[in-house]
Amino acid sequence: MFSLRAMSLRGRCAERAHAVLRQGIATAPRLAQASPQLTIDTVNPAVVEMEYAVRGPILHRSMQLQAMLEEGADLPFSKIVQCNIGNPQALGQKPISFTRQVMSIVLNPGLLEHEGLFNDDVVARAKKYLGAMPSVGAYSDSSGVSIVREEVAGFITARDGHAANAADIFLTDGASSGVSRVMQILLRSPKDAVLTPIPQYPLYSGLAALLKGGLAPYYLDEEQGWGVTIDSLEGSIATAKDADQQVRALVVINPGNPTGQTLPAALMQDIIGLCLKHKLVLLADEVYQDNIFKSTPFTSFKKAWRDYERDVGVDDGTPGLQLISFHSTSKGFTGECGLRGGYFEAIGFEDAVLEQMVKMASITLCSSVTGQIATGLMINPPAEGDASWDQYKAERDGIQSSLKRRAELVCERLNALEGLTANASEGALYAFARIHLPDAVTAAAKEQGVEPDFLYTMRLLEETGVVMVPGSGFGQEEGTHHFRTTILPAEEDMEGVLDRIGVFHNDFLAGNLSYTIDLEQ
Amino acid sequence: MFSLRAMSLRGRCAERAHAVLRQGIATAPRLAQASPQLTIDTVNPAVVEMEYAVRGPILHRSMQLQAMLEEGADLPFSKIVQCNIGNPQALGQKPISFTRQVMSIVLNPGLLEHEGLFNDDVVARAKKYLGAMPSVGAYSDSSGVSIVREEVAGFITARDGHAANAADIFLTDGASSGVSRVMQILLRSPKDAVLTPIPQYPLYSGLAALLKGGLAPYYLDEEQGWGVTIDSLEGSIATAKDADQQVRALVVINPGNPTGQTLPAALMQDIIGLCLKHKLVLLADEVYQDNIFKSTPFTSFKKAWRDYERDVGVDDGTPGLQLISFHSTSKGFTGECGLRGGYFEAIGFEDAVLEQMVKMASITLCSSVTGQIATGLMINPPAEGDASWDQYKAERDGIQSSLKRRAELVCERLNALEGLTANASEGALYAFARIHLPDAVTAAAKEQGVEPDFLYTMRLLEETGVVMVPGSGFGQEEGTHHFRTTILPAEEDMEGVLDRIGVFHNDFLAGNLSYTIDLEQ
């Protein structure tokens, strides 16, 4: 019914990918190895099974092409444009100055000896962090430094109009490590399933495979702007139960990745009702909460639940909602991916369960303390009247308005092409476009043992230098084909990138370009 | 035969620990929860099973006492001294200035506009990193930025006199996340076992439990300075085989943690021979390679293996050694724990296996890029003649000589006490002392359902404010009792800390102090 696999040529691709990985680096001679302990045949099969399309063979091919460009090869394009991953600063987005100024002092307090280097509010914030920890070079508490957890609780309280507690906040290396930890706590066996949207950011399917747990897919409705429907959720729960699975949790990505939709508040209440009815832990992936391109502001599931609790109530003796909401410095308008900051807020759990979450964090001691500070700076930026306010506001508004323009431009230009349709990107950093491929393409793909949209995306890369992720990497309805592109190329490059995609697309669908890919190269 | 459990009171302690965790933070009212999805009874049992004594109930009790001190409580001590974890900067150790200066520029390149703030070599290094990546705020390649991987390869080549390849280097968040990834690749089921020293840093036993894999313990010989013996290893392999387990890997921690021994080169060759004979992946935990307190310099297993290969050779058709060596910015003399930098070097693996290691890294996208840069700065410090050399050398030598003095002082003072014996700390950051406890203590511990050294360590904390880890948290021979203390209190505090330990120890063994602990408080 659906495929999370981009292709069925793992072995060849793995070799090729590694050859790319090692390119340009002389390899020391290796001894003949008749039968060492660890070979690909004896690697934990759950690891081999795990797929993660955002960084798969197409990215590896792009690295190979990048190296060829650097060696002066004559290719149909002059640079690689990475639209495969939401990595804004890799495409020229500048960091927020306030964030980096504070961090430079926290790392090098000696800078405070020089007068006039920083605004007063920069110095004050840096001193606040420095005073609250022995050093950014010391391990923090497993869940993160108290001062940032307090800042996060303050942010959530202000955002939602409902109180949050620092004790419920866990600081993490990006959102991914928090999701990983929570999935590990939830999934006991393949009989435990997590309801996951299709299409989905493949972290969830990857972790379910790695942890030998189950996945219960539910389909987003492309015709309805990638909407979630309660019917689809109920159907997936019933299917999982028929397969003797216990559905333990529901993943909702809002704004959607790869699909870009945002959930209406009324639907969020229905989803909460469904979670209460079936006693599901709600995993709210809300990392794109600051990337909203329509006029309705973001509503968190925490707010939706507290409103529900207040307005609808729950029956006596009914458990309240168990909710975990994830956030990350990597997204929003700050785009601080490399700093690996993030948090999750967990509510509705007994203390003994929270203690297990702390223990899971403690085994790797703590998350990056620089990432923790980046998290504090993201959710507690300069306020109006502060010395850094004007610059902060200009930087923030500049990035946000540019992202909105680019989101609209990408969707408009893609929809103008014959054989491409894309729902509006209401939020997040992507467009997820449906490709209506001629039979010749699907036949050529089948012959080569790859998914049709993998073939499209690989050929797009080879002709234009633009790196995207095929829809098959996120899962999709059988017989449909998509690609995900970020909206992140710099504004001055965007028209050119879209032109190249358009020319390729028309030529490819018209049969003017080869449908053959060489996976051995 | 041995116990990796500090105690058998998980439930009560978990509650208490969490109460401590939440201390001082007002908790929003919770709804009655008749039977939510996730309770302690339905958490993945592998998570519950996992133990990690370095951050267990004694640390939590210390946090509680710290809060009491801050509230002005009248306790027998005026401050908490954390000797439970190798966290130098938490106890006042200053970071290396060069490291932090470079990092402040990399985070805030605007500092380059100000003349005269930094030495030329600081600026040059910062520009080198800035030129090699789009931004420290961009995701790097999954295995880390090339420039640092090249620096690490250069460091290993110079250290060992044998070539290393950047393609074999994986940058990680500290060493722990690398160990976690490798264990996940190795352990397919409880039938797969990893040979692990007892006593051991409990990351290995914790991960084996979490990943539902097997552990094959081998005992270090306390009488022989915590030596590894081939007989003991062969015996453990035979025992595992009798239990129908496949022994896949051997963990060697050198210098030892918690035990502080360093391996002689001849023994390392024997260990390599054993790994070749039994086809074991050698996991070399070498994070303390820069913490050596005796005159013989550190020998890496990579060097030992390349020497073996050259001098002894391997039979045609015999697989070469599969070796993974771990390192971390958290240890050495830099002690940059909070920055979460580290790497592992993997040699002897086919490309398809290395590709799985890359994929494992890719699911959380990349390690902290600030941590990656900290790793480069650790292994590629200023060279003689550079502008920052004199300051760097003074800082490095100051820390190293002080650590050596403290290591010697701790062992000398502990051995002077009646009923305490400690082997010399040849390396790492710890002393692991045997406590010869009177029967009254073991009886009191048994009555309270805790290990005798847990009782000792908890009472030590309550009487002196000194936080240690009981030997039972690392595993030990049945009937023996130990504690691990770091050697990290500042030199000016060290005599005082040792005085307090001595007074407590004598009083405790003489029966002048209570043997009762209150785990409900």
Image: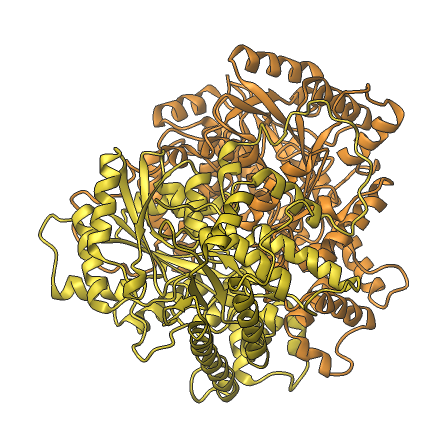
Chain colours: A yellow, B orange
- The location of residue A143, given as percent across then percent down, is 44, 53
Whole-percent x, y for residue A500 in the image: 58, 72
User: In this view, which residue lies farthest toward the top?
Assistant: B242
Residue at 61% of width from left, 16% of height from top? B237
Which residue is situated farthest in the left direction here? A316
> Image quadrant of residue A457?
bottom right
> Relative to residue A77, is residue A234 depicted above or below?
above
Q: Is residue B234 left or right of residue A326?
A: right
Instruction: In this rendered view, identify the residue nearer to me: A376 or B161.
Output: B161
Q: Residue at x 31, y 70 (%)?
A: A157
The answer, for residue A19, to whether it is visible in the render is yes
Q: Nearer the viewer, residue B486 or B169?
A: B169
Name the foreground residue: B113 vs B54: B113
Question: Residue B229, relative to residue B122: is it above or below?
Answer: above
Rendering coords of residue B496 (x, y %): 61, 48
Q: In the figure, is residue B508 to the left or right of A150?
A: right
| B381 relative position to A491: left or right | right
The image quadrant of residue B25 is bottom left
Find residue A183 and report its horizontal and vertical position in percent: 39, 45
Quadrant for the N terminus of chain A in the image: top left
